[in-house]
Image: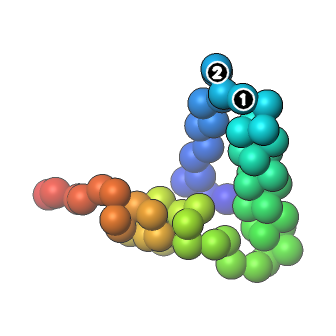
Amino acid sequence: MPHHGMTPHISGSSLSAQARYAAGTREILESWFTGRPIRDEYLIVDAGALAGTGVHSYSVTT
């Protein structure tokens, strides 16, 4: 997973929210290890460019 980044911030979150975070993290890792594509809603950057949620949430300025 070159150039990967995971920063879960779970302090103060409910137990049900923590369970959702864990399930999402597991899905991402299982997709990666089995060669399946990661769902767009989990992506911020892909192949060096904004992707998925990142396209709608961020902009790149040079």
Marks 2 and 1, Cα distance to the nearest angstrom? 9 Å
Is residue 48 among the parts visible in the rendering? Answer: no
Residue 60: % across, % down = 23, 59
Looking at the rendering, which quadrant does residue 30 occupy?
bottom right
Residue assigned mark 1: 14
In the image: residue 20, left or right of residue 34: left
Tell me what residue is drawn at x 85 percent, y 74 percent.
34
Looking at the rendering, which quadrant does residue 8 occupy?
top right
In the image: residue 16, left or right of residue 6: right
In the image: residue 48, left or right of residue 26: left
Characterize the local packing of mark 1: few (<14), some (14-19) or many (20 or more) Cα atoms within 10 angstroms: few
Residue assigned mark 2: 11
Residue 1: % across, % down = 67, 59
Disc 2, SS: loop
Residue 15 against residue 2 in the figure, above or below:
above
* Residue type (three-letter) at the residue carrying disc 2: Ser
